[in-house]
Image (cartoon, helix red, strand yellow):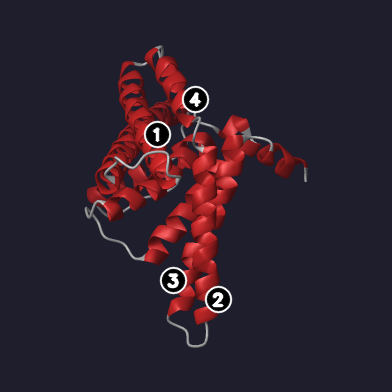
Amino acid sequence: MDAFIRVSNQSQGRDRLFRATQHACMLLRYLLESKAGKEAVVLKLKRLETSVSTGRKWFRLGNVLHAIQATEQSIRAADLVSRLCLTLANLNRVVYYICDTVLWAKSVGLTSEVNREKWQRWATRHYYYFLLLSLVRDLYEILLQMGHVARDRAQREKSSRDPPKYSVANEESEWLQSVLLLLFQSLKRHPPLLLDTVKNFCDILIPLNQLGIYKSNLGVVGLGGLVSSLAGLLTVVYPQLKLKAR
């Protein structure tokens, strides 16, 4: 209950809750659409999804200021690659929220001189660039963590006289097994990096589908959005799980 109160008291937490509800409705719609006699339920889920999506726009109104602040902070990151990726990603996020605000103004009737399709396309494109750059940063962090794990393992093997714990038939299998083991140990050692990678990977399915780069069905988009929203909620409830800039 305390965790729910903490989430609901933050606009970011409320947005994640609404987003999880929106994508859960989308996933349930996909699962029920092919079943006979579920037309009324599907219609209710679609209406709820639309209402939640509209409500989320109010929570995102001030996010452009948070994105600008995040951009200023990323410029001060010590690591060059992280600084470049985060700064470019956050700049694209600023543009995305500006487009989102213009679309909100259009939807509530504050302006009529807005080409909705054009602004929606711009918003989706910059959201895609933001997520792509975020994933590049995640990959860079994963490679750094794998390097640390490999060095630690090499030091342990050097100081130990024990034989290897496993053997394989050929070098290719040995290389693949070693890489997968390094990846597993790196993500296990760094849960914030695992959460951020999962969240960004699931999120990027949405603009990939909307831009026509990689078409997915409603179920895949709904499941990806739901998993991403739950991962985001974890970082709100437990701030120590949020990936920090180097």
Asked whether disc 4 touches disc 2, contact meaning CB atoms under 8 Å apart, the reply is no
Q: Nearer the viewer, mark 3 or mark 2?
A: 2
Residue 115, position as x, y percentages in the image: 26, 44
Residue depicted at 49% across the width and 66% down the height: 46
- State how far apart marks 1 and 3 are (Cα): 28 Å
Q: Nearer the viewer, mark 3 or mark 4?
A: 3
- State how far apart marks 3 and 4 are (Cα): 36 Å
Residue type marked 1: Tyr
Residue 15, position as x, y percentages in the image: 56, 43
- Residue 223 vertical placement versus 136 (above, below): below
208 vs 124, nearest the viewer = 124
Q: Nearer the viewer, mark 1 or mark 4?
A: 1
- State how far apart marks 3 and 2 are (Cα): 12 Å
Report the residue marked by disc 3: 30
Instruction: Find numbered disc 2 in the image and state the secondary structure of the residue it sits on.
Output: helix
Residue 90, position as x, y percentages in the image: 37, 27
